[in-house]
Amino acid sequence: MIQTIGRFIFLILVIDVSNLSSQYLTSINKYLNFHLIWNKGFAFGIFQNEISMVNYIYMFVMAIIAIAVFFYAISINKKIYYYGFSLIIGGALGNLLDRYQYSAVLDFIDLHYNNYHWYVFNIADISITLGCILIILLELFSKKENDKTVKNDT
């Protein structure tokens, strides 16, 4: 396990993306392309800018949100929720590190059907999305269990 983590960290450290530009890299199949996009904006590429001060504000807001989610996860104190919150915090920190190092987030996964393309995203975005879905599912199912318990008590 430790060797696998070490190899993964090594791969992250040796990949240098500083000289990449927005360019089409490769087509994996008819539904998936790898296309490098430097997202200098916020969610879904809105508020694209070249102003470094706005970039620092984005980073500050993302760091505050990640810290708030961390403390909220600790306050819930349910082990199953830690997985969802860990995915959210990990994805947020991944995007935060990209933004700090490159002043933009590197998005590269392009899903499409014919000429209909979804927004280009990265692994950190997948992690955040899966964490949110897990938390929503946990909340939905825990609400049903709580409602059944309350109905049985009355």
Image: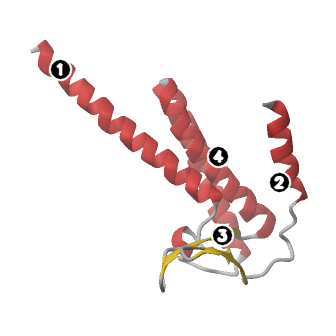
Label 2 Cα neighbours within 10 Å, binned few <14 / some 14-19 / many ≥20: few
**Residue 45, image x and y in percent?**
56, 75
- Mark found first going from the N terminus, 3 or 1: 3
Q: Quadrant of the C terminus?
A: top left
Circle 3: residue type: Asp
Which residue matches tag 3?
107
The answer for how far apart the CA atoms under marks 3 and 2 are is 15 Å
Q: What is the secondary structure assignment of the residue under circle 3?
A: strand
Asked whether disc 4 touches disc 2, contact meaning CB atoms under 8 Å apart, the reply is no
Q: How many marks?
A: 4
Q: What is the secondary structure assignment of the residue under circle 1?
A: helix
Label 4 Cα neighbours within 10 Å, binned few <14 / some 14-19 / many ≥20: some
**Residue 76, image x and y in percent?**
46, 27
Circle 1: residue type: Val
Label 3 Cα neighbours within 10 Å, binned few <14 / some 14-19 / many ≥20: many
Q: Which mark is residue 87?
A: none
- Mark found first going from the N terminus, 3 or 4: 4
- Mark found first going from the N terminus, 1 or 2: 2
Please say if 79 is above or below 84.
above
Q: Is residue 41 left or right of residue 99?
A: left
- Mark found first going from the N terminus, 3 or 2: 2
Q: Quadrant of the N terminus?
A: top right
**Residue 66, image x and y in percent?**
60, 46
The answer for how far apart the CA atoms under marks 3 and 4 are is 16 Å
Which residue matches tag 1?
150
